[in-house]
C-alpha cells in the first residue's frame, strides 16, 4: 500500500532537487536553490502563524482564570466549562478538517480557521457574560481543530523532499512558543487585552495567505494543471526546471487516485487494527496523562499548592517548555521514537508523583511544607511532555498508516485526544489520573 510513498522518498537521495535551466555554473544552481528555500521558508512562516495561534489558544485559560472569574463573577464550575469547552470545538473542527481542506484548498481552510479564531477572541475580549466566553471558546476550538490538520499538511506538500522533516518540526515548535507566550503575557496584561493579542496571529496569517501559493499537490489532485505548474514554479524559483518534480507529483497523484477510497470503518479491518490501536492509544494516553490539567489550570494549581500567585510558576513553565521541544526535535531521529517516548512518559509520571506528594503533605498537615514539589513537579512534567509525548505520537501516526488510509486515520486519531479531555475535570484530578 505504501509503495508509492516509499519510492518517492528513495528518489530524493538519488536525484537532484533543483535543476537550473541554461546554466552550468555552480553559483547559478546555488542561487536557484537559495531562492527556493527562501520562498519555502516564507510560506512556512505564514502557515505556522496558525500553529502559534493554536498554542496561544491552549495556554490562554491558565493565566487568565482569576481575572475572568473575578470580573464576570463566574463560579469554578462555569470557568471549568470555559476552560475545557475548547476541546469540544476542536473535536468538531477535527471531524470536518479533511473535508474543508480538500474542498476549500489548504489556504482556504487556513483562512476559515483564522476567521473562526478571530471571531472567538473578539467575543471573549468584549464578553459581558459567560455565554459570550463559551461561544467564543467553541469558535476558537473549531478553528484550531482545522489548523491542527491543515498546517502540517500544507507544509509537507510545499517543501522539497530533503527538507520536509526539518520544516515539519517547526509546526510543533511554534505551538509551544504560542503557549509559552500566552503564559508569560497573561501574567502581565489583563485577560481582555490578551484576547485581543490573540487576534494578531489570525490577521497576520490572513494577510500572508494572499501572498503565498496554494499547495501544488492539492492543485494537481483536484484538476488545476495550469495553477499547479505556476505554484510549483513559484516555490522552486523562476528559472528552475520543475519538469521532473512536476512529473513525479502527477504520477504519484494518479496512483493515489487509483487506490480504493477509504472510509472510517475500513480502519477496523484486521490489517489495520494494530495501527489503529497504536495510534489512538498513544493519542488518548497523551491527553489522559494530565496535560490539559496543567496547561489549562497551571496558575490555579500553584495557588492551591500554597504559592501566593501562579505568575512565577507559569513563567517558569514557559521558560522550560521551548528548549525541551527543541531538544526533542534534535533527538527524535537520533535516539528513535520509542526510547524518547518512554523517557518522556517516565518523566511525566515523576512530575505527577511530585505534585501529588505536594498536595498530600498539605492535606495531611505534615511538619514540613512541600509546596515547592508542586513547582518542581509541574516543571518536570511539562519539560518531559515537551520532550516526546507532545509531538512523537503525531509523527508515529503519520508513519504507521498506508497512504490511502491516512485521511480517515488522521480524522480518527485527531478526534481521540479531543474527546479524551473531559469538561469539569479538576486540575489536580487530571494530574492524579496521570
Image: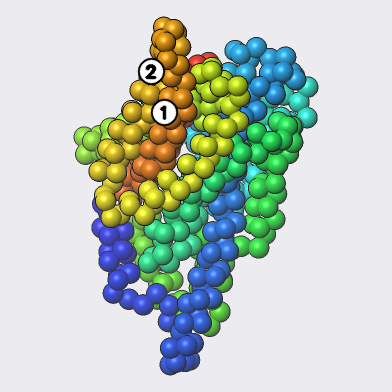
| Residue sitting at x 41%, y 59% | 166
Colour setup of the view: rainbow
Label 2 CA crowd tier, 10 Å (few <14, some 14–19, many 20+): some
Q: Is residue 44 above or below residue 341?
A: below
Asked whether 329 or 351 is in front, the reply is: 351
Residue 111 in percent (x, y) is at 64, 48
Gap between marks 1 and 2, in whole Å? 9 Å
Q: Nearer the viewer, residue 132 or 410?
A: 132
At 59% from the left and 12% from the top, the residue drawn is 77
Quarter of the image with the C terminus is top left
Say which of 135 and 348 sits in front: 348
Q: Secondary structure at mark 1?
A: helix
Q: Position of residue 329 (x, y in %)?
A: 39, 52
| Comes first in the chain, label 1 or label 2 | 2
Left or right placement of residue 268 versus residue 378 in this view = left
Which residue lies under the disc numbered 1? 377
Residue 330 placement: quadrant:
bottom left
- Residue 150 appears in the figure: no
State the residue lying farthest toward the left. 270
Whether residue 239 is visible here, answered yes or no, is yes
Q: Is residue 43 above or below residue 312?
A: below
* Residues at marks 1 and 2 touching, judged by CB atoms closer than 8 Å: yes
State the mark number for residue 357: 2
Q: Residue at x 78, y 22 (%)?
A: 128
Callout 1 crowding tier (Cα within 10 Å): few <14, some 14–19, many ≥20: many
Q: Which mark is residue 60?
A: none
Amino acid at each position: 500500500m505504501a509503495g508509492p510513498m516509499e519510492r518517492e522518498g528513495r528518489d530524493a537521495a538519488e536525484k537532484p532537487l533543483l535543476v537550473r535551466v541554461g546554466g552550468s555554473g555552480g553559483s547559478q544552481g546555488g542561487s536557484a536553490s537559495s531562492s527556493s528555500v527562501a520562498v519555502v521558508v516564507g510560506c512556512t512562516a505564514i502557515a505556522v502563524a496558525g500553529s502559534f495561534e493554536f498554542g496561544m489558544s491552549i495556554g490562554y485559560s491558565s493565566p487568565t482564570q482569576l481575572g475572568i472569574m473575578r470580573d464576570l463573577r463566574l463560579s469554578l464550575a462555569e470557568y471549568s466549562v470555559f476552560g475545557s469547552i475548547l476541546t469540544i470545538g476542536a473535536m468538531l473542527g477535527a471531524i470536518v478538517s479533511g473535508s474543508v481542506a480538500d474542498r476549500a484548498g489548504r489556504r482556504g481552510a487556513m483562512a476559515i480557521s483564522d476567521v473562526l479564531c478571530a471571531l472567538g477572541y473578539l467575543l471573549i475580549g468584549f464578553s459581558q457574560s459567560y455565554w459570550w466566553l463559551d461561544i467564543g471558546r467553541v469558535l476558537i476550538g473549531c478553528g484550531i481543530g482545522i489548523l491542527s490538520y491543515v498546517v502540517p499538511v500544507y507544509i509537507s506538500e510545499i517543501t522539497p523532499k530533503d527538507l520536509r522533516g526539518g520544516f515539519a518540526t517547526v509546526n510543533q515548535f511554534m505551538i509551544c512558543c504560542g503557549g509559552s507566550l500566552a503564559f508569560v503575557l497573561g501574567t502581565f496584561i489583563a485577560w481582555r487585552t490578551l484576547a485581543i493579542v490573540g487576534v494578531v496571529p489570525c490577521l497576520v496569517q490572513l494577510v500572508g495567505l494572499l501572498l503565498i501559493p496554494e499547495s501544488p499537490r492539492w492543485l494537481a489532485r483536484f484538476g488545476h494543471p495550469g495553477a499547479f505548474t505556476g505554484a510549483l514554479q513559484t516555490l522552486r524559483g523562476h528559472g528552475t526546471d520543475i519538469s521532473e518534480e512536476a512529473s513525479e507529483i502527477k504520477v504519484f497523484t494518479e496512483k493515489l487516485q487509483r487506490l480504493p477510497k477509504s472510509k472510517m470503518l475500513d480502519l477496523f479491518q484486521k490489517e489495520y487494527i494494530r495501527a489503529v490501536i497504536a495510534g489512538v492509544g498513544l493519542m488518548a494516553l497523551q491527553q489522559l496523562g494530565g496535560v490539559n490539567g496543567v496547561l489549562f489550570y497551571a496558575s490555579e494549581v500553584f495557588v492551591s499548592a500554597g504559592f501566593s500567585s501562579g505568575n512565577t510558576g507559569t513563567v517558569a513553565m514557559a521558560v522550560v517548555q521551548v528548549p525541551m521541544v527543541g531538544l526533542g526535535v534534535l533527538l527524535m531521529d537520533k535516539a528513535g521514537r520509542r526510547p524518547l517516548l518512554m523517557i518522556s512518559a517516565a518523566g511525566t509520571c515523576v512530575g505527577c508523583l511530585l505534585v501529588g506528594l505536594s498536595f498530600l503533605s498539605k492535606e495531611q498537615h505534615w511538619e514540613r511544607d512541600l509546596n515547592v514539589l508542586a513547582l518542581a513537579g509541574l516543571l518536570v512534567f511539562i519539560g518531559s511532555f515537551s520532550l516526546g509525548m507532545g509531538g512523537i505520537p503525531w509523527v508515529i501516526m503519520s508513519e504507521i498508516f498506508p497512504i490511502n488510509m491516512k485521511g480517515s486515520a488522521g480524522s480518527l486519531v485527531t478526534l481521540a485526544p479531543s474527546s479524551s479531555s473531559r469538561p469539569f475535570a479538576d486540575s489536580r484530578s487530571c494530574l492524579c489520573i496521570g
